Image (spheres, helix red, strand yellow):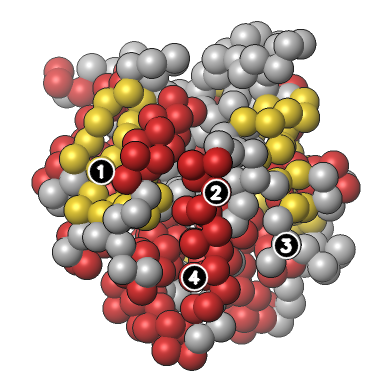
Amino acid sequence: MKSKFGEYGGQYVPETLMEALIEIEQAYLKYKDDSDFISELKELYEEVANRPSRLYFAKRMTEELGGGKIYLKREDLNHTGSHKINNVLGQMLLAKKMGKTKIICETGAGQHGVATATIAAMFKMDCHVFMGKEDVERQGLNVFRMELLGAKVTAVDSGTGTLKDAVNEALRQWTRECDTTYYLMGSVVGPHPFPTIVRDFQKVIGEEVRWQLQEKEGKTPDVIIACVGGGSNGIGIFYDFIENKEVELIGAEAAGQGVDTNYHAATITKGSNGIFHGMKSKFLQDSYGKIMPVYSMSAGLDYPGIGPEHAYLAESGRAKYLPVTDAEAVEAFEYLSKTEGIIPAIESAHAIFLAMKIAPELDNDKVIVVNLSGRGDKDVYQVARYMGVDINEQ
């Protein structure tokens, strides 16, 4: 099982975690091609996650913008409201096969935490979610949902109190209890084998897009766009098309208040090679390699690094990654809501904004597919505050 993507990836962890990582890799290699495991996962995708998710033609958006056709891969319609459940179902099933009785995870916007808490309840497993204090305050609805589902939620107030700090604390806790506990990584980050495992459970998104668009348009996409923090929804929709160089792959990074300020999370645009959270990748760091504070109004994108496979795709030129500011994401959030009647997650709105820019530049026979990675219920209050609207006075 390949542990690196070019120079990126690997395992940079203390000895105490190596045995646990080896155990996970061996279990994954045992089950990933096992017909019973594949059949059970397929049934879970259909019966629990509501797959295949719909490929939706954004007719009004396409007509209004002109140029290329825009399709939305509706991961927001999945059970729990985002793409996160794809990976959670796969890893939870793996944990069950390994005989683990407890799940531990990190979460940023809360969607991974909600999905994990949901399936842990279904599988009757204990669940402990670590979430940055800042994100707990921004995403109170998702915190309550996790607790309602029976999960213990720990607010992490170290560092900047965001996703990177939640990962730090979750990994520390895992070292104390890895005999009985499975760490359910939420994105394509961390030490090997997590980037590969998470990708493999998310690649169903791109596989579905391939046959769905063939049915609708008789072709493959010309452009695929996804928001990118750690990068799981992005690699999920990109992966099946990486070898087809005619398909342009574009990631939307969180530019926050602008890449020329200190308030952004645009890792590919402004980052450099380094080692953090057990992997070699690209990170926002100072000249001494110290990880810098990052910012985005999107709790799911304010991570100071990116998955190693994305770093490799950027370095090789196979994919490009473009910054999108908070203001631009809010513009797209409002635009999609009013144009198609779909309220997207603020993370997904970053990708929608790039589609709004790119579509008018394309010929009418070109097709853009945007991964609508999650729904925006969780972000309505935050966007309202950003727009200066007091919901309580409405």
How far across and down, in percent of the image, does residue 369 sit?
63, 59
Distance between the alpha carbons at the discs numbered 1 and 4: 22 Å
Of the image marks 1 and 4, the number of the one nearer the N terminus: 4
Residue 175 visible to an observer of this rendering: yes
Q: In this view, does 366 lie to the left or right of 19?
A: right
| Residue 128, disc | 1
Distance between the alpha carbons at the discs numbered 1 and 3: 30 Å
Amino acid marked by disc 2 = Met
| Residue wearing tag 3 | 2
Amino acid marked by disc 4 = Ala
| Residue wearing tag 2 | 18
Marks 4 & 2, CB-CB < 8 Å contact: no
Between residue 107 and residue 109, name the one nearer to us.
Answer: 107
Residue 222 visible to an observer of this rendering: no
Distance between the alpha carbons at the discs numbered 4 and 2: 14 Å
Of the image marks 3 and 4, the number of the one nearer the N terminus: 3
Q: In this view, does 102 lie above or below 50?
A: above
Give the residue at x 30% y 55%.
Answer: 180
Distance between the alpha carbons at the discs numbered 2 and 1: 21 Å
Between residue 74 and residue 91, name the one nearer to us.
Answer: 91
Between residue 155 and residue 236, name the one nearer to us.
Answer: 155
Of the image marks 4 and 2, the number of the one nearer the N terminus: 2
Q: Residues within 10 Å of mark 2 (few under 14, many from 20)?
A: some
